[in-house]
Image: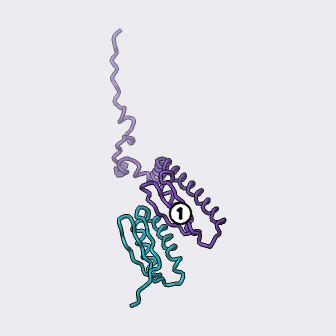
Amino acid sequence: MARKKSLSVVRFNTKIYKREAIKKTLSAYSSLADFILRERRDYIDVEIWNPVSQSGNILADEFSNYALGMVKKCR
Amino acid sequence: MKITINTKVYPLEAILNTCYVFIDRAYIFLSGNPGKGKVEISIKGKNKISSKQKEPLVSEFKNELLHCALRQQVSRNNKKIREYIIGRALFSMLPVAELTAGGGQEGYQKDSLGIASTWEEKYGKKKKFVRSKV
């Protein structure tokens, strides 16, 4: 099995971005790439692997925008 | 472009509301520690824009931030009166039977206020006047 290349890592501060919001974002974006979630004390790191489309650079930005929207919705 | 915001001046709620307004025009990412009074906002335009075009976007963001903070403060100040008005409006929508004590379950035959009684029943017994001898 070929090693997948990590596209980017987004670090979310849990004092700003709620866990629930990030998990909802993950489930919404699950069809567009592979995601690995690493929970730390104050941060949640989201690794983005294997994006479906070539416009992978935009994916991380879109992901964080969606997470921001979810944060507002979850409040 | 990065902006650092003091959360003691602009509350996190206002910052989030402002970011939400700009979500369709820019990629926004928040970092920093709001507990220590510092939030860093990175704003990246969705379309490729020059540095000259970035400045109005950031200025507009700051203006919107001020607007959101003020709106939140006004909303907090008017909370009690808003709740009172809504409470009054909902209370006036209740049926009349529920507004009266007992919920109108007594029925008219019980006549707890004594409305149905006649004048004679109430005041019929005349007092006897005693003539005093002059």
> Where A3 falls versus B30 (above or below)?
below
Quarter of the image holding residue B130? top left
Q: Position of residue B31 (x, y in %)?
A: 47, 63
Farthest-out residue, bottom = A1
Quarter of the image holding residue A34? bottom left
Q: Quadrant of the C terminus of chain B?
A: top left
Q: Quadrant of the N terminus of chain B?
A: bottom right
Q: Position of residue B41 (x, y in %)?
A: 52, 62
Q: Nearer the viewer, residue B17 or A43?
A: A43
Residue in the picture at 51% in, 70% down:
A65
SS type, badge 1: helix
Quarter of the image holding residue A31? bottom left
Instruction: Identify the chain drawn in purple.
Output: B
Q: Position of residue B6 (x, y in %)?
A: 50, 54
Q: Mark 1, residues whose alpha carbon is within 10 Å: few (<14), some, or many (≥20)?
A: many
- Look at the image and name its color scheme: by chain
Residue in the picture at 37% in, 51% down:
B103
Farthest-out residue, top = B134
Q: Nearer the viewer, residue A20 or B107?
A: A20
Q: Is residue B103 left or right of residue A68?
A: left
Q: Amino acid at mark 1?
A: Cys
Q: Which residue is mark 1?
A: B19
Colour in which chain A is shown?
cyan
Q: Chain of mark 1?
A: B
Q: Position of residue B124 (x, y in %)?
A: 36, 32
Q: How many marks?
A: 1
Residue in the picture at 42% in, 56% down:
B35
Residue in the picture at 54% in, 60% down:
B3
